[in-house]
């Protein structure tokens, strides 16, 4: 059990983190005080062309020296600093959160249509699998993840997330089973532009993991959620599928339903399922995925985890609980529950 | 100097108080164990193969069978079998023939692997109430979806290669007409048609009476090319090139002339009564590129309408070989483990050559995964699959589907006596003698085989549901849902499976 909530303002008008903190804290019943986190898009307008790389350092000596050196090899560090934190009585500071604003060189790798993204992806995989005491937990442009082991309000106050303003926010309140109390195990998970919050357990993890590994990803976070970020990156960014098609690949209709569809649609879904069989996600889950262009929420094919949607003008809310949405926005206009596997999509209007 | 006889393998006795002299044992035994003299049933135990035909037909349960009724001086190295093989070969100077699968007491990896189930954090799924998908497609898959975008609409550009659609990941492996009887093959054919799956024809051509079920057959091309013509290729739903077989990797096959009756000779397109000898290698495949060429030729001949599979025996380097096969236009790689059955094989091969299917699946799946092509080609596993748990474990290790052979014959009566090569099968399976073949009623036989497939399919659904999976592709290669119990570290590493408790 975990609590999730996400919001997008489709006009890209930015919201500070105070209301999502209230909403997430309302779902404390769904967590255990061992992990919470937030991600916000649009928070670093001063570095809008840099990858914002957030790292947990165990100390600022060996691991940081190694990260500095690998980043400098692969690009330019435009700016770096410790992420400001504020001690909370009930939150033990286990790591030093650090951020780099980084511009990768784009002429160092071949065989890719997006050398900047693929260089940063390579750096994330390398640092996380080979540098002890350093964990990159956020690597996108103009976005940032803030997470720790603790209750939602403590984590929010630790980072003072009300100081950040974003047009998309996702938040997660964790009841850990796999990796209790580990900061890296808290959600959201992020890779490049993709961020994920997830309530549930992915029973197909072994299959999904082998598939993403086969495509060059390394699973280093000891939890099933990171695989969702990699699947979205692979299918959405590298294969170029639109988000609703990615969702259909991950939580496709049943064969019996597909068989009864009109020929063209049947062929499309059959081809999609055969191509992306190993990407199909099984098990109980409700997931919200964000990119700079919008958010997508969906559940497993038989909806074993709750997901509620609310709308108010340009704002779209997706959450585990209606109460959380109403706390964030008492004026919310429509509330509904999407069907199993049905994608709920909020796009920015450009 | 006479070597004398070796002790009896089995001792048959009749409880004379129970026996009502109905003579069913006498009529049923094709090996001549029983005869009547002066109104008394006499027994020649030396002829017994433990096929259990008499025992299963006796209405009074009056027949008893004892294995190894005579003791040797016990010795850990010089087992009775070792001594008897030496005696036999000293006598004959020949290779020892054997039937069915590997009879050595190697550890069974399947039995050291345990499956997973859900508790609390993830709910199990009840297959009685929720959909459970076992549908499996075998054939080439695209690496990624190609499409064009029109006003937000996605227009598909990818055209799928032909795939076989299976309602359950259980198929019946290649057992040729000749090796088994027509009634046996017909029973299997009717069963796969009923259960929405496929069977292999083996290297024996396709008899006319199988034609009605041809859409559920995979036609085999082996090194003897028996029964192969364009008509044969076009009838099958898929084509399989057999390079090797788990029971006898590296060698060919031999169907004795006694089994080549007129029907078999017509179906195989060979002279009546002649030995059908399949050479060890295909004489047009001396390298991987030759194989790729043959795959393409077969596709060309059938207008690229049919998937082509390639079957190899699980040998030490199976992963690299499979990766080579996967690089041809082949749609599926079939790997046959060292426990795979056979009608006849030299015992030394059957018992000593090749590797277990569990390790072979894991190694092949891993190699293809490392090379980023696992999902583009299907992987079919066979050789020693005894129950639905073995199937679930095979799929979790990385197989798309399995072939069963021996199990489907047991469903027709076979008791794994291992004398298939003698052509006297009292169950009417591995024989061409009309009076024995007639013992199988294809209608009833197919019901039993279909029952078995259905029962295993049900069990698979239950196992998947308990593991919180409602689609077979989420079990495939999902080694997280397996644990090794008392397997050594080296093997756990090959299988990429954690130990129990980990």
Image: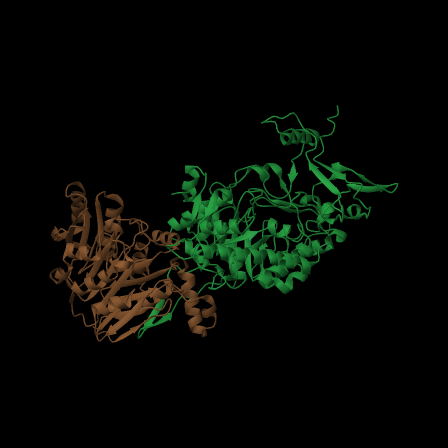
Where does the image place residue B416, in percent across and percent down from the top left?
64, 45
Q: Nearer the viewer, residue B441 or A241?
A: B441
Q: What's the residue at 53%, 58% (across, down)?
A: B458
Q: Is residue B195 visible?
A: yes
Which image quarter: residue A246?
bottom left
Foreground: B195 or A96?
A96
Q: Residue at 28% across / 59% down in the picture?
A: A29
How many marks do you count on the picture?
0
**Residue B206 in sight here:** no
Task: Report the coloring of the rendering.
Answer: by chain
Q: Is residue B319 above or below residue B134?
A: above
User: In the figure, what tint was chain A given?
Assistant: brown
Colour chosen for chain B: green
Q: Is residue B70 left or right of residue A304?
A: right
The residue nearer to you, when weighing B389 against A74, is B389
User: Percent position (x, y) of residue B488?
Assistant: 44, 37
The front one of B134 and B65 is B65
Kindly indicate the quadrant of the structure image that contains residue B497. top left
């Amino acid at each position: 059990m975990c609590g999730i909530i996400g919001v997008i303002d489709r006009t890209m008008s930015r919201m500070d983190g105070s209301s999502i903190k209230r909403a997430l804290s309302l779902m404390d019943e769904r967590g255990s005080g061992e992990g919470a986190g937030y991600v916000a898009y649009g928070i670093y307008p001063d570095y809008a062309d840099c990858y914002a790389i957030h790292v947990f350092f165990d100390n600022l000596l060996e691991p940081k020296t190694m990260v500095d050196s690998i980043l400098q090899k692969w690009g330019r560090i435009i700016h770096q600093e410790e992420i400001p934190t504020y001690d909370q009585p009930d939150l033990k500071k286990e790591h030093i959160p650090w951020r780099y604003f980084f511009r990768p060189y784009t002429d160092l790798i071949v065989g890719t249509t997006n050398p900047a993204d693929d260089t940063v992806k390579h750096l994330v995989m390398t640092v996380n699998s080979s540098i002890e005491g350093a964990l990159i937990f956020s690597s996108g442009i103009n976005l940032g993840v803030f997470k720790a082991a603790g209750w939602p309000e403590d984590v929010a106050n630790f980072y003072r997330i009300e100081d950040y303003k974003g047009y998309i926010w996702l938040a997660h309140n964790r009841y850990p089973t796999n990796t209790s109390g580990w900061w890296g195990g808290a959600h959201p998970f992020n890779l490049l532009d993709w961020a994920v919050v997830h309530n549930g357990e992915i029973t197909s993890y072994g299959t999904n993991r082998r598939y993403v590994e086969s495509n060059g990803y390394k699973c280093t976070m000891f939890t099933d959620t990171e695989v969702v970020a990699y699947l979205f990156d692979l299918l959405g960014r590298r294969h170029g599928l639109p988000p609703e098609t990615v969702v259909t690949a991950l939580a496709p209709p049943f064969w019996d339903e597909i068989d009864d569809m009109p020929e063209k649609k049947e062929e499309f879904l059959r081809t999609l399922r055969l191509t992306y069989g190993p990407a199909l996600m099984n098990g109980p889950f409700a997931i919200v995925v964000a990119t700079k262009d919008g958010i997508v929420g969906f559940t497993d094919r038989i909806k074993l985890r709750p997901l509620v949607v609310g709308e108010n003008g340009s704002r779209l809310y997706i959450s585990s609980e209606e109460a959380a949405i109403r706390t964030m926005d008492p004026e919310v206009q429509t509330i509904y529950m999407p069907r199993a596997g049905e994608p709920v999509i909020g796009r920015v209007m450009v | 100097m006479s070597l004398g006889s070796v002790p009896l393998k089995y001792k048959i006795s009749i409880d004379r108080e129970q026996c009502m002299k109905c003579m069913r044992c006498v009529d049923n035994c094709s090996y001549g164990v029983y005869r009547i003299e002066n109104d008394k049933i006499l027994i020649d135990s030396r002829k017994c193969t433990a096929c259990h035909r008499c025992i299963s037909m006796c209405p009074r349960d009056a027949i008893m069978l004892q294995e190894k009724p005579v003791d040797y001086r016990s010795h850990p190295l010089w087992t009775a079998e070792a001594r008897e093989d030496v005696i036999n070969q000293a006598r004959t100077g020949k290779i020892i023939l054997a039937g069915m699968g590997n009879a050595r007491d190697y550890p069974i990896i399947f039995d050291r692997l345990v499956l997973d189930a859900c508790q609390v954090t993830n709910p199990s799924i009840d297959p009685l109430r929720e959909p459970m998908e076992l549908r499996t497609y075998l054939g080439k898959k695209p690496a990624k979806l190609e499409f064009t975008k029109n006003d937000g609409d996605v227009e598909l550009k990818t055209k799928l290669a032909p795939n076989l659609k299976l309602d359950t990941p259980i198929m019946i492996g290649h057992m040729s007409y000749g090796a088994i009887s027509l009634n046996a093959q017909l029973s299997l054919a009717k069963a796969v048609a009923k259960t929405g799956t496929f069977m292999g024809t083996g290297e024996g051509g396709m008899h006319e009476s199988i034609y009605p079920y041809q859409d559920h057959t995979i036609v085999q091309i082996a090194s003897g090319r028996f029964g192969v013509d364009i008509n044969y290729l076009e009838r099958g739903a898929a084509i399989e090139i057999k390079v090797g077989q788990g029971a006898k990797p590296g060698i060919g096959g031999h169907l004795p002339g006694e089994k080549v009756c007129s029907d078999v000779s017509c179906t195989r397109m060979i002279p009546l009564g002649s030995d059908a000898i399949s050479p060890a290698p295909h004489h047009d495949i001396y390298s991987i590129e030759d194989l790729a060429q043959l795959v393409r030729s077969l596709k060309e001949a059938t207008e690229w309408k049919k998937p082509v599979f390639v079957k190899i025996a699980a040998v030490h380097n199976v992963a690299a070989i499979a990766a080579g096969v996967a690089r041809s236009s082949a749609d599926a790689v079939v790997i046959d483990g060292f426990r795979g059955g056979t009608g006849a094989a030299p015992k030394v091969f059957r018992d000593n050559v090749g590797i277990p299917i569990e390790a072979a699946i894991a190694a092949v799946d891993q190699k293809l995964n490392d090379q980023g092509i696992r999902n583009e080609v299907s992987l079919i596993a066979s050789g020693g699959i005894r129950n639905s748990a073995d199937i679930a474990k095979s799929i979790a290790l990385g197989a798309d589907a399995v072939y069963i052979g021996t199990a489907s014959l047991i469903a027709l009566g076979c008791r794994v006596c291992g004398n298939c090569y003698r052509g006297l099968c009292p169950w009417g399976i591995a024989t061409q003698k009309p009076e024995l073949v007639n013992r199988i009623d294809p209608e009833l036989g197919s019901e039993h085989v279909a029952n078995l497939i259905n029962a295993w399919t049900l069990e698979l659904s239950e196992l998947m549901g308990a593991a919180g999976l409602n689609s077979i592709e989420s079990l495939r290669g999902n080694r997280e849902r397996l644990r090794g119990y008392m397997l050594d570290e080296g093997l756990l590493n090959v299988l990429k499976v954690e130990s129990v408790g980990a």
